[in-house]
Image: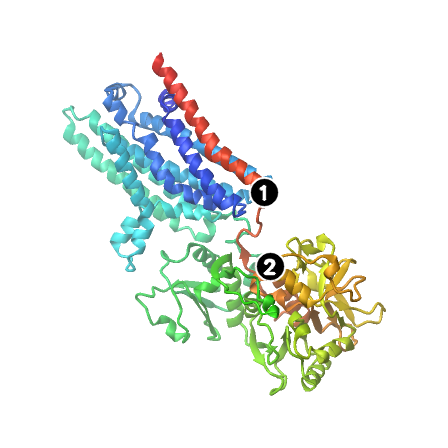
Amino acid sequence: MFAILKKDFFSLFNNVVGFIFIAVNMAFYGLYFLANNLLSGSPSISATLGGVLLIMLITTPLLTMRTFTEERKNKTDVLLLTSPVSVSRMIIGKYLAMVLAFSINTVLIALSIFFLRIFGKVSFKESFVALLGFWLFGCVCLAIGTFVSSLFESQVLAAIITEGVLLLAYMMSAITGMSKSGNFVTKILGSFDILSPYNNFGNGMIYLSSVVYDLSLVFLFLFLTAEVILKRRWTISRKKILTSTFSVTAIVLCFAMVILANVGITKIPEAYQTLDLSSNKYYSLTKATKKYLKNLDSDVTIYCLSTKDKCDVAVRHTLSLFNANKHISVQYIDPDLNPTFANKYTKESLSEGSLIFENTDNQNTDTCPYYMLYSNSNDSYTLYSYAQQSGASYDKVYVQTADGYDAEGQILSRLQKVNSAEIKKVYQLAGHSEVELGKAETNYLSKKNLTLETLNLRTDAIPDDCCLLILNGPVSDIGTDELDLIRDYLKKGGKMLLTMNPDSITSADGTPNLNAFLTEYGLTPTVGIVEDLDSSYRNSQNNYFLYPDLTSASSLTDGIATKPSVLVPYAIGFRLPTDDNSTAVSILNTSDTVKIASVEDATAAYNNNENSDESSLADLDTQGRVSLGAAVSTNNDGKNNLVVLSSCYMFLDNVEQIAPGMNSALFGNIVSNSIVSSDDSDAIVVAPKPYNATVLQFTALQVGVFAVVWIALIPLALLVFGITIWVVRKRR
């Protein structure tokens, strides 16, 4: 076997075929790597490998088409068939020679992971899991190509048939997905789907079922190859009929073994047959969730509006983790067979893959639409319309993309909701051109099982069930009657979050009432926009996008990174009194070198996409540190019940994309640790797990050098070296 392996391996590289195979694969991998990693800054090669899979369908026949067809063409197959080496060892030797050549290609790809590490934090585990899936995918393709090669005498025909079979297997998931009935035929066809197992690896998960599936396909096609070779060996024998009967029996037994292995592995609970090596542990439960499930004493049924086979793989796995709890039962409902099932629980139209929760003890129910299981963001060409000050208008183009996985957090939130009898409400004030909260913040309130409602103090009083009052960036001033209601609410122990809006400075009458209200608690607003002259306290692209220092002594900043941290864009800062008797404590601070820019200057800088110079800044009390956020005790009892932030833009969706998780974490801390009292009944919130939160940065020179070396020089060098060896051998 080793002699055959050695002979075939060196023949691949003596005959330039092996060099062509590696060169073509590396050139296309370099193109995908350039697009997905260098230009996009992704720290994982999972998506890059996913693009190369299609190229593998084309290059695989380069190795496999000559495996047996060349032996038959040169009449050397007789020597193999009559040699003392068993057929199985002969086939394994030839197959391993191709796998070894493919492994060289895989090792070269692995080097690119270490290249990425030079420029920042890289998802090593996630990338190598994807590489394992890629290698197994290639092994399956080689096994299929080996079988096809044993059937034909023409290399060209073997290559064409191999490509056709591989392409069909690659597309099988999409083909079977066209049928919603899930009949017997589609299940049979679906068993020849070679793409889905790789997708599992591409998610950073090692599925035992995927490993078994790939290895069983390799075994099956090598066994079928052996049967074809044995058939040729015994064709001239007197025992032809008996051998044929034995072959059919052996093939049936082989298929039975493969089926039993793949069916048997599915009987193991999915929660116990997987290993989560994803960068952010997307498919594992957090400690907070495990603790909650450990103490769960009510029975809850989770209905998934999908068949188990068609259910989102990631969601299905997360559901299996919850299903491992004795009090939770997961049931899959086929929406085609039960189109009105959801109507018993909600009037809302739920898409396929949505979840329904039912507490079988108290009969409480809730729903979770499928789209909420992923954290979605809107990418746009403009950050926000701050430039409306100057009359400029912008056409915004939004593209919604999934930027995180939120199934655990959404499921946990619903479990807590159906197990709770208490409903808490948060009221957001309206009537002064306030800014709406971003998706991350409203999603947090929803997970916290807090109902968000709108309140206008011009017509209504603050309800008794209000656990939190939010005034987010009013443009026009607050009436004195309204402020009286707010004061009374705070004196009674009410909780409030207030953010400032830069637009209020240039509004017709300003906000003198609101400013006076803040002054009562020791907060004096600046009359312009804060610009930090210390580069470590601001965004490199805009002096008015600030990264303040966090006060470590405050619980409001727990769990938030330091630099860069919370992003505060276009802020109206505060001056705090320096005496020890102040009821206001700063939680976000600038450096000691700040300037206060006029709104006009800040707007001009934004419109022109440039930072204003020092001479253009308004010279208005610009010395010393400025607070960008403060916690206030309105009752002088040392308990902070009012939090004031200097910019309402902190909670916009687009700002969340620039500082992923930081601003929403501050909002969550304000709600959990200061605004809503934390007790045993307080809901646990699990934040969305962001995809590729780390973005690598490359210079144009680095990208150019890599593109030239990897896409052009390395493949050309391999081809030149291979052709040189081939020419030298021909001249001997």
Task: Tell me residue 50's x, y (percent).
Answer: 42, 45
Secondary element under disc 1, as helix, strand or loop, is loop
Measuring 27% from the left and 24% from the top, which residue is drawn there?
A: 70
Residue type beneath disc 1: Thr
Farthest top residue? Answer: 732
Tag 1 residue: 699
| Residue 666 position (above or below residue 128) | below
| Residue 128 position (above or below residue 718) | below
Tag 2 residue: 661
Q: Foreground: 547 or 18? A: 547
The reply to whether residue 318 is visible in this rendering is yes
The reply to whether residue 215 is visible in this rendering is no
> Which image quarter: residue 723?
top left
- Whether pointer 1 and pointer 2 mark residues with C-beta atoms closer than 8 Å, the reply is no
Task: Tell me residue 491's x, y (percent).
Answer: 73, 81
| Residue 665 position (above or below residue 452) | above
